Structure formats: C-alpha cells, structure tokens
Amino acid sequence: MLPYPQIDPVAIALGPLKIHWYGLMYLIGIGGAWLLASRRLKQFDPSWSKEKLSDLVFWVAMGVILGGRLGYVLFYDLAAYINQPSLILQVWKGGMSFHGGLIGVLLCSWIFARRNGKSFFELMDFIAPFVPIGLGAGRIGNFINAELWGKATDVPWAMVFPTDPEQLARHPSQLYQFALEGVALFTILWFYSRKPRPTMAVSGMFAACYGVFRFIVEFVRVPDAQLGYLAWDWLTMGQVLCLPMILGGIGLIAYAYKRQPVQGAA
C-alpha cells in the first residue's frame, strides 16, 4: 500500500482569499491547451491571430466550467442542489461533470464557429487534441481533493484517502483517469491529428477513446453515493453517459472516411 500524500487543497491563502488546487488545475489545463493550440494555429488557419485563439479558449473555458457544473447538478445530484442552491457556486469543493462540460463546449464551439466562418466539425477537430490537457489536470485536482476514489482493493499501489469514512485501501482511480483520459488520450489525438484527416475523424477519435477509457475506469471507481449503481450491481451513470460517446465516435470516424477520403500528407 502507498501512503496518500497529504496535500492541502488550498494552494494559496491570503487572509480570507483562498486559492484551491482544484481551481488552479483548471487554469493549468486552459493555459496548456492555449500554448499547444498556438503552435498549430497557422496549420489550422493562417489568417487567425493569437487574439482570436484567446477568444476561442475563453469561449471553450466558459463551456467547460458552466456546462461541467450544471451537468453535475442535473446528472448526479439534482435534489441536493434544489434544496440548497448556493452549493452550485461552490465549485472549489468539486462536483464537475465531464459530460456536462462536453455539452457546454459543443454549444460554445458551435456559436464561435458560426461567428468565425468555420464549420462546427472543423473547429472541433482543431480543439479535440488539446482537451486531454484539461482532463488530466482536472483529475490531479480530484486526487488532491481526495475525491472520486476507487473501490477497496489489495493492489500494492492502493491508498487510504483521508475523506473516506471507512478508511479502506482503495484504487487511486483519479490517477488511472489522469493516465488514460489525460496522458494516453492526448498522445493518441496529438499523433493522429498530425496528418490531415477527414473532417469529423479527429472529433470521432476523441469521443470513442474517451468513452472507452472512462467506461473501463468506472469498473474500479466508486459511484456517486446519491446514485449508486443503476443496474446489475456494476453499471454507473458515467458508463451510461459514455455509451453514446463510444457509438457516436465510431460512427463519426466511419462516416468521415466514407464521405471524404484521407487528404494528402502534411
């Protein structure tokens, strides 16, 4: 068993002002995505300036934060937030839904694409390789917050999380998700998108791979207490929400290659 590193969730405290690691992880993810996107900007559209890229990143960030929070409220714990609406604003305590954030990003990207003369999937194919940076950073934030831990286990790398009332050795599922949704997904998408691909293919690859990775990790992750398992003592809300992503991603890839053959190499 490995000791859980005791990291204060508050990174910086200046009197009453407290800056949490969870929030900093979002800033790191957004900043890292902007930095890498700026390296591919001319390849995407030579006429775009870094100011326009900054506008895009702002829109996407708003989609992530607002969609992620509202998605968690709607998908995972609606009753609690209806009883105490002020909890919705307490984002530093965690409680962000990837699938809600994805819906927010899709909506904001659609609006931004229409305003800037791009098709929706042109823009999404450009954005997709940078999303895992934010996903990975967010999972590190979950780990520091000692939330979303896994099932009890006797694997050598199990940890006892301070927020666990049972104090059992558990899978550090946040780190599994960091490795899969962050490192592995970024690697796949970065190298896949280095060569020209049919429009929609990169977006489809993102959806399919994320869906598969998340579906797998859900088997060792403890479901949200207020929901539990939805069926068969193993099916979680996360897995249900991932199934459309997997099927839709595969469908997008197949349709993209059928509709438009691969372009010439870069």
Image (cartoon, rainbow, N blue to C red):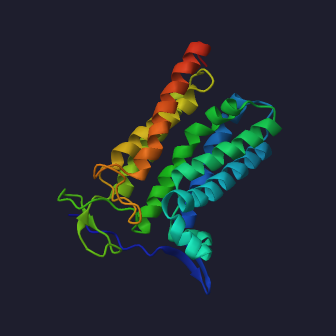
User: Percent position (x, y) of residue 231?
Assistant: 33, 50
Query: How many numbered markers are drawn?
Result: 0
Q: Quadrant of residue 130?
A: top right
Quadrant containing the N terminus in the rendered view: bottom left
> Residue 181, relative to residue 76: is it above or below?
above
Residue 216 in picture, x, y percent from top left: 34, 44
Note whether residue 259 is visible.
Answer: yes
For the residue pair 215 and 84, the one nearer the viewer reads as: 84
Q: Is residue 29 left or right of residue 222?
A: right
In which quadrant is the C terminus drawn? top right
| 219 lies above or below 47 | below
Observer-nearest of 208 and 247: 247
Q: What residue is rendered at 53% in x and 59% in y?
A: 72
Query: Which image quadrant for residue 48?
Result: top right
Image spot of residue 49 (x, y percent): 79, 40
Residue 21 visible? The answer is no
Q: Residue furthest bottom?
A: 15
Across and down, in percent, residue 264 comes to: 61, 13
25 sits to left or right of 60: left
Q: In this view, does 254 lie above or below 248?
A: above
Quadrant position of residue 223: bottom left
Q: Which residue is drawn at 79% across and 46% down?
A: 51
In the rendered structure, the answer to whether residue 234 lies left or right of residue 37 reads left
Q: Is residue 233 above or below residue 166?
A: above
Q: Which of 210 and 69 is in front in this view?
A: 69
